[in-house]
Amino acid sequence: VLDASGDALAAKTVRRSELFFGFLSLGLLGFGGIAPWARHVIVERRRWLSERDYAEFVSLGQVLPGSNTINASVLIGQRFHGLSGAVIAVVALMTMPLVVLVMLAVLYERFAALPEVSAGLAGAAAAAAGMVIGTALKMAWKLRPTPVASVVGVAAFAAAGIFGFALLPTIVVLVPLSVGATSLMRRR
Amino acid sequence: MSRGGLWSIAASFAPLSLLMFGGANSIIPEIHRQVVEVHGWLSGDAFATLFAIAQAAPGPNILIVSLIGWQVAGLAGLLVATLAINLPHCVLAYAIGRVIAPHGNTVWVKALKDGLVPVTLGLILASGLVMGRAADHGLLSEVISGGTAVFIMLTTRNPLWMLGAGTVAGFAGGYLGAM
């Protein structure tokens, strides 16, 4: 039976080797963030999952701790082949990026001491920091947070960015407060 | 590095695996605190550079931790750091995936997500500040950071362009003695 979102595709079987090579290629594609590529490959090109199933995996991956792409890989691998599928998906996803990373690290060790290179890297580091700041501000702007969310966001920013508090107490205090307050506000 | 050193890499990163809500960038201030302030494994400068390399490389941004492992203790350090930061949350995701029926989770997932978003955003902004401070070599680096932030906010172009532009500006600044 096919519904509008093509859910019958969910019954599709995916071989372990397909899983491995699919995630291997994803790891290499994901320049500057893997998420948009993952959807393209998994839903559109390989048709492993329907749009709706994929969205479920990604949103579950987002609320769990950890990189959400890696979490979604665990869940998708598990869906097709249980524990071995989860291991295959994650290992395949990480292999190529780790290889590239080691090459970059070797280059860095070799050339970082040269003054021109170190000045260039300092410029890259400053830009990388700006990328993170710009992304956070843009997301906050687009979300138009409620007053409660704004207070929580500012508190998290101050705790980690200004006061340098450890992460564990920050999370333990702010997450339950935020989830509770947000749910309460919605119910009213 | 000794076995004790590898153990302390694992002990520093494994707990963060389960505190990483909203991806790698939310735990950057804590990684910085551990690596630069608590253990003194890297200088702030080196940390900022490794962060830029991890951003430029393909794959998930959490690879910054693997890169730190490599810098601190070579290949063994890379493997230990990669496992420590990823294994705990993968095990959790696997366990949750086994328990939860597909499509059965939308209500609580939505409630959790809505509550997590502001915490995550605040932490990511804090990451930007911590990294900006670590990368700050004076006016030129501040202009690069600020310019990149504005570029990201106002355009939808690939941010790697700004990473490239920042590198060129830093290189030129170094040549002129401003970096």
Image (cartoon, coloured by chain):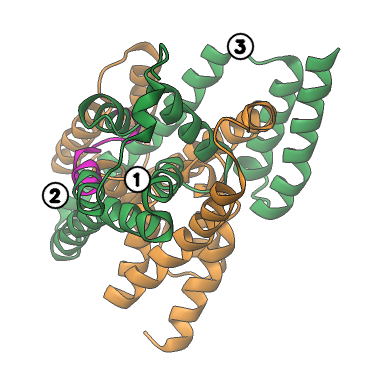
Chain colours: A green, B orange
The answer to whether residue B45 of the structure is visible from this angle is: no
What amino acid type is highlighted by mark number 3? Arg
Which residue occupies 54% across, 14% down?
A: A141
Residue B14 lies, with reference to residue B167, above or below; the image says: below
State yes or no: residue A34 in magenta.
yes
Read off the chain for label 2. A
- Which circle, 3 or 1, is nearer the viewer? 1
The C terminus of chain B: image quadrant: top left
Q: Mark number for residue A41?
A: none
Q: Earlier in the sequence, mark 3 or mark 2?
A: 2
Residue A95 spot, x, y in % from top left: 24, 57
> How far apart are the two marked residues, 1 and 2, measured between alpha carbons?
28 Å
The answer to whether residue A177 of the structure is visible from this angle is: yes
Residue A107 spot, x, y in % from top left: 14, 60
What amino acid type is highlighted by mark number 2? Glu
Q: Main secondary structure of the magenta part?
A: helix
Q: Which residues are drawn in magenta? A: A23-36
Residue A8 is left or right of residue A62, and the answer is left
The residue indicated by pointer 3 is A144
Residue B73 spot, x, y in % from top left: 34, 76
Q: Mark number for residue B60?
A: 1
The residue indicated by pointer 2 is A116
- Which circle, 1 or 2, is nearer the viewer? 1
State yes or no: residue A136 in magenta.
no
